[in-house]
Amino acid sequence: MLLLTLGSNVSALAEGQQDLLMSASATLVRESNLFRLPPGVDAMALVGRPSPSATVGTGTLGLEFNRAFSMQRVEFEASLSAHRYQNFGYLDFMASNYRGLWRWAYTPLLTGNLSSSRTQQLNSFAEYQGFKQRNERIDSQTRLDLGYALDARWRLLSGLTRSTRSNMLPLAQEADYRLAAFDAGARYLLASGSSATYSLKTTSGSYFNRPLSSSALYDDGFRQTDHAMQLDWAISRATTADFSAGYRQRSHPHYQQRDFGGTIAGAHLRWAASAKTLLTAGWTRELGTFETSTSNYVQNEQLSTAAAWQLSTNATLRLQLEKTRRDYLGLIGTPVSIRRKDHDREASVSLDWQPLKPMTMNAALREIRRQSNAQSLGYTSSAISLQAQWGF
């Protein structure tokens, strides 16, 4: 089964400096397994059609502003997208997204960023199985961070973040929330370009649109602490690596059964093998909340590798492979035999081609396979895509 994407994107690409850019795009997608159904199920009973495939059309208008004012720089992007699903019209929606960033500098020694963003999208059917209803998700975030250079080597860092996530329909395992976070740390720089950073982040959050429940152990808030070490290593002009390690602890005010903690870590390598070849590899381990009757959180471990080859001055070939293991853990008393475990494999290959200076085209092929010990959560989805972008 193949997913076909055919797109046309009209974007403003400037020759030299241009403050204000405008864009318009049109995309046509053929989705083979939109609802991520497992093999052998009755699609008619679940989604009302004999096949879970769908054709999706998207039209987007966009605006981008980027300008420097002395030591300051202001960046802003906004888009309005209309998504239309053939045969599944109840999924149609309009998305408005934006990202604003002020790169400020009070002095050359005291600098930082003030940013705000909003993202609107459908919840993935890989987790959300409300097949006959639309469930949109809106994520918004505002952040202020600053850095102060004590000397040529040491930097002091701090930041404030406010985030909100809301779903059109209740999603208990990843409920709507508001959070406020403060982080502080220090960075040591080497003349080679390498650096080491330590940060401490404390987060206070509250859930809304989900009542406090003693039977389901759904709490109304949480507190989280993250300790993190980051090493960025400039091995050579062609090779860089970064390593991270930390510990995450989350607690809840009413139902301590939902508390969890564990290590988070990552390692990535980037090697420019030649002027036209780039290779990357990475491993990450993350923890995230996922509240059900058998789990408190999910532990993700991912291995990835990617390659990019510049075939000519106007063509680049890309390859990416990912393997992810997800363990759903944390609820005391849950037998090991019924704890959910997922294994995802994803492979993609794409070709970027610029036949004309203002025009870029892309063709890609992707396949995702999930194996799960949880009934009805394994699936296979493939994709083939074509896209065109035009700048003026």
Image (cartoon, helix red, strand yellow):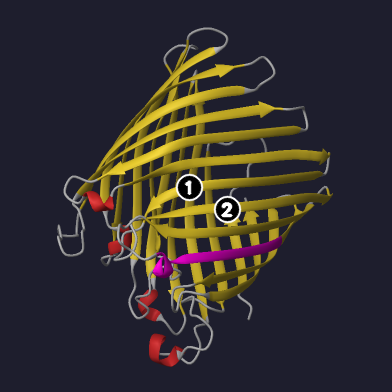
Viewed as shown, does residue 306 lie left or right of 312? left
Q: Is residue 138 magenta?
A: no
Q: Quadrant of residue 348?
A: bottom right
Classify mark 1: helix, strand or loop. Answer: strand
Q: Could you tell me residue 53's position as x and y percent?
A: 52, 82
Query: Of marks 2 and 1, which one's residue comes earlier in the chain?
Result: 1
Q: Which residue is mark 2?
A: 302
Q: Which segment is the magenta one?
A: 336-349
Is residue 364 positioned above or below 161 on the image? below
The residue to which callout 1 is attached is: 286
User: Which sits in the foreground, 268 or 180?
Assistant: 268
Q: CA distance from mark 2 to mark 1?
A: 9 Å
Q: Is residue 127 above or below residue 222?
A: below
**Looking at the figure, which quarter contains the N terminus?**
bottom right
**Badge 1 density bin: few <14, some 14–19, many ≥20, Cα 10 Å:** some
> Going by the picture, which residue comes out furthest to the top?
151
Name the residue type under label 1.
Answer: Glu
Q: Position of residue 338 (x, y in %)?
A: 40, 70
Instruction: Please name whichever residue, 228 or 18, is drawn nearer the observer in this view of the structure.
Output: 228
Picture quarter containing residue 251? top left
- Image quadrant assignment for residue 339: bottom left
Q: Is residue 231 visible?
A: yes
Give the amino acid at mark 2. Answer: Gln
**Residue placed most toward the observer, 341 or 211:** 341
Tell whether 153 sits left or right of 158: right
What is the chief secondary structure element of the magenta stretch? strand
Q: Position of residue 258 (x, y in %)?
A: 27, 52
